Amino acid sequence: MASPLSVAALAAGLAITSPSPDNSRTLTVRVAGDCSEAAREVVEKTGGQLLSVQPLGDSCIITVLVQGNGQRPRKVTVKVPM
């Protein structure tokens, strides 16, 4: 399961890790809307693992990986109003 920090970072927008001139890594978060609560609810209701969160207009597009009963996990995408 994703850590609360990674959920918050993904839910806040797009998290990008890029190398800096001194070869260290920098985390940049673009905030277009707050989808953190919606992401938390979808993960809780599906019992899945958070893959991505994308704010889109007045909605959040949330994708989770849900384990099947002895089958391959399936990817589930949910659109939630913000």
Image (tube, helix red, strand yellow):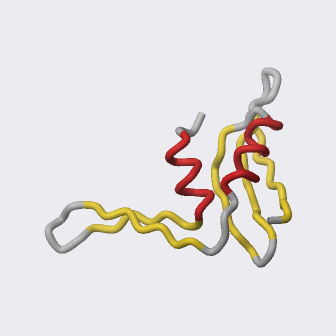
Q: Residue furthest left?
A: 22
Compared with 41, 81 (above or below) is below
Q: Quadrant of the N terminus?
A: top right
Lateral position of residue 76 relative to residue 33, left or right: right
At which x and y percent is residue 68?
A: 80, 29
Compared with 29, 41 (above or below) is above
At which x and y percent is residue 22?
A: 14, 68
Q: Nearer the viewer, residue 27 or 82?
A: 82
Q: Quadrant of the C terminus?
A: bottom right
At which x and y percent is residue 80?
A: 84, 60
Compared with 61, 71 (above or below) is above
Lateral position of residue 82 relative to residue 28, left or right: right
Compared with 9, 59 (above or below) is below
Residue at left 66%, top 54%?
36
At which x and y percent is residue 26?
A: 31, 64
Q: Residue furthest bottom?
A: 57
Residue at left 65%, top 45%?
50
